[in-house]
């Protein structure tokens, strides 16, 4: 840490000298009646400037081309997403139209049963059967469109053939519900990949009904029981450190949401089929129970659809935002402004990632991570500099992904940006740990204090409400006073946290897009309001307890006075009684 402080001192001294030199250069230019900010001192500087300009122009043109290509890709993705949304709307309308009719029919049957106007069971069953067939067709079409074959009891790939019966085997005959292998003569577990693969000489059934030995490089899909080539149908899941299948409801989060939604629609069919079977049977049924099951399935479907649609809307929003940024990138080529090049004073475009001589004075080339406005001159200055290597190798450029110590919290983390210290005017790294720790540590501490406060309030309530016997109000008063201090402390902490988040939001505004900053901080105000409301309610409870204790103490004093008065009356009565008794003299 001492070495880092010395390096910061040297940097500060260098920047002061550089600023004074720039001021003298400006003064000299004014004396010589030069327009502009500076002049090139020699041909070597001019040659270096021209080479840098050529390099930057080439890079900007290349990045403009990349931006145009990326924008075209995003436009195509948006078109596909809009087309997919239209198909989803059509499916939603078709399914809901039939579903509403089915729910209406069940409700009508319940109302008629209450009025003892019972329709023939076969008639209701026939109507439900027609609706179920329509819904089944709609679900089948959507499953086929989304390639969710597993929900239809089918799947992509081929079936394995039993060696004994020469018949196609189902998934249940091959593997158990927990993934254990049942057909040990046909399947084996590959210890290297973790996939269930066919044994040698295993036969599969092709689409043309011909038999064929399973080639090498095939695996068994755990959800469908079908055999597929490994190439192109599996991917590596880094969270679970194993290979997973991509085909049939395993191809991403949206595919999972689609599968859940369709599974809820299929569950709806099963409830309606059960209702239809009850109508056909001669056994007495409970229509209210059937309606409850049906409405429960409807609620599950509504929640599943809401999750799926929310993810699609979020994806569309991200694509639109990325397309806007790609268009800006295609227009600017990544240039974020004009900065002064080295000591020449000539302007060059500032491009994120562009290597420039270290403004801090080292001999290193450092990448530009952003720009800021110099308040003294009103000009853009590059956010680029050096930091101490964690392996003890001296100064290294501040680059994204490198590990560094964050000065705010003193923890090591990956670099995600850089900023200019407002006091020292030195470029320092911003780490991922600072963004998470600064936000999480106060929140965790506040939650723990609020939990402790809740437990203390609950214990106090039990003590004064008679749950605990032999309640001593003097001790309760001491607890109330302590809790009052805790509430005041939590209120101060909540207000300090609100101010800290406001300051952090202004810092993040210079590092992140506006919509990302709003997404991160959109609940900050509401969270602080909820915390203050909770503390206000706790304070009100404390005041009520204090009033209760005061009242009970007054009542206790009153009761003691009444008791003492009663004792005094008894003593007076005893004395009067002794006075009126006849005296018996001795003989």
Image (cartoon, grey):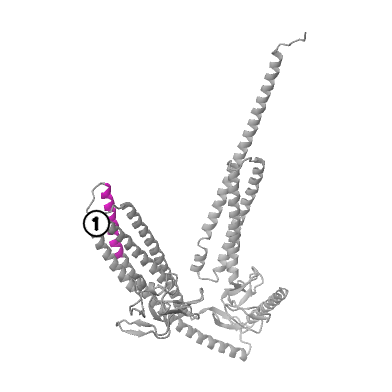
Can residue 225 be seen by looking at this rendering?
yes
Pointer 1: what residue? 124
Q: Is residue 374 left or right of residue 71?
A: right
Count neighbours of disc 1 (C-alpha within 10 A) and say few if under 14, some if 14 to 19, many if 20 or more.
Answer: some
* Residue 181 against residue 572 in the figure, above or below: below
385 and 105: which is toward the camera: 105
* Residue 126, percent from left and from top: 23, 60
Total residue callouts: 1
**Outermost residue, right direction?**
587
* Residue 504, percent from left and from top: 58, 65
* Residue 358 against residue 525 in the figure, above or below: below
Q: Which quarter of the figure has residue 123?
A: bottom left
- The chief SS type of the magenta part is helix
Q: Which quarter of the figure has residue 257?
A: bottom left
**Outermost residue, top direction?**
587
- Say which residue appears at 43% left-offset and 80% top-offset: 197
Name the secondary structure under disc 1.
Answer: helix
> Residue 508 in magenta?
no
Q: Is residue 154 left or right of residue 191?
A: left
* Residue 181, percent from left and from top: 44, 75
Q: Which quarter of the figure has residue 33?
A: bottom right
317 and 282: which is toward the camera: 282
- Say which residue appears at 35% left-offset and 56% top-offset: 293
Can residue 148 be seen by looking at this rendering?
no
Quarter the C terminus occupies: top right
> Residue 104 in magenta?
yes
67 and 274: which is toward the camera: 274
Magenta residues, start to end: 93-114
Quarter the N terminus occupies: bottom right
């Amino acid at each position: 840490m001492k070495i880092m402080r010395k390096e910061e001192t040297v940097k500060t001294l260098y920047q002061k000298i550089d600023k004074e030199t720039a001021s003298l250069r400006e003064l000299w230019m004014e004396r010589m009646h030069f327009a502009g900010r500076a002049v090139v001192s020699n041909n070597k500087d001019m040659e270096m400037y021209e080479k840098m300009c050529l390099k930057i122009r080439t890079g900007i043109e290349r990045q403009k081309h990349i931006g145009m290509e990326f924008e075209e890709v995003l436009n195509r993705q948006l078109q596909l997403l809009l087309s997919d949304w239209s198909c989803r709307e059509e499916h939603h309308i078709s399914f809901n139209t039939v579903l509403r009719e089915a729910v209406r029919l069940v409700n009508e049957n319940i109302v008629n049963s209450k009025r003892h106007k019972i329709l023939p069971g076969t008639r209701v069953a026939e109507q439900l059967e027609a609706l179920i067939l329509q819904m089944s067709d709609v679900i089948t079409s959507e499953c086929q469109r989304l390639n969710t074959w597993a929900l239809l009891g089918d799947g992509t790939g081929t079936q394995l053939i039993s060696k004994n019966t020469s018949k196609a085997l189902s998934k249940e005959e091959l593997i158990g519900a927990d993934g254990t292998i049942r057909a040990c003569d046909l399947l084996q577990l590959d210890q290297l990949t973790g996939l269930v693969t066919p044994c040698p000489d295993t036969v599969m059934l092709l689409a043309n009904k011909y038999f064929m030995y399973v080639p090498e490089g095939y695996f068994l899909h755990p959800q469908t029981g079908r055999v597929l080539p490994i190439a192109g149908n599996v991917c590596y899941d880094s969270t679970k450190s194993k290979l997973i299948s991509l085909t049939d409801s395993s191809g991403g989060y949206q595919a999972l949401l689609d599968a859940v939604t369709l599974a809820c629609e299929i569950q709806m069919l099963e409830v309606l089929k059960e209702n239809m079977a009850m109508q056909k049977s001669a056994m007495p049924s409970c229509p209210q129970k059937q309606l409850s099951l049906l409405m429960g399935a409807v609620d599950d479907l509504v929640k599943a659809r809401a999750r799926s649609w929310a993810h699609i809307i979020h994806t569309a929003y991200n694509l639109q935002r990325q397309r806007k940024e790609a268009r800006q990138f295609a227009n600017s080529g990544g240039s974020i402004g004009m900065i002064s090049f080295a000591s020449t004073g000539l302007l060059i475009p500032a491009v994120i990632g562009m290597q420039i001589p270290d403004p801090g004075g080292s001999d290193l080339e450092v990448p530009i991570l952003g720009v800021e406005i110099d308040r003294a001159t009103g000009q853009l200055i590059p956010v680029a500099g050096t930091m101490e290597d964690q392996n003890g190798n001296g100064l290294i450029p501040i680059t994204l992904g490198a590990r560094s110590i964050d000065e705010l919290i003193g923890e090591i983390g990956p670099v995600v940006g850089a900023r200019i210290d407002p006091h020292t005017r030195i470029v320092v790294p911003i780490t991922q740990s600072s963004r998470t720790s600064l936000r999480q540590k106060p929140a965790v501490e506040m939650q723990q204090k609020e939990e402790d406060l809740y437990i203390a309030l609950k214990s106090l309530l039990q003590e004064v409400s008679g749950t605990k016997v032999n309640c001593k109000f003097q001790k309760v008063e001491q607890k109330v006073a302590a809790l009052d201090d805790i509430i005041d402390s939590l209120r101060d902490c909540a207000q300090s946290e609100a101010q800290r988040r406001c300051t952090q939001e202004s810092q993040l505004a210079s590092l992140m897009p506006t919509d990302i900053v709003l997404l991160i901080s959109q609940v900050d105000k509401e969270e602080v309001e909820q915390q203050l409301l909770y503390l206000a309610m706790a304070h009100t409870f404390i005041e009520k307890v204090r009033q209760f204790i005061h009242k009970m103490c007054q009542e206790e004093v009153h009761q003691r006075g009444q008791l003492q008065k009663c004792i005094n009356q008894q003593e007076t009565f005893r004395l009067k009684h002794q006075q009126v008794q006849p005296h018996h003299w001795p003989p």
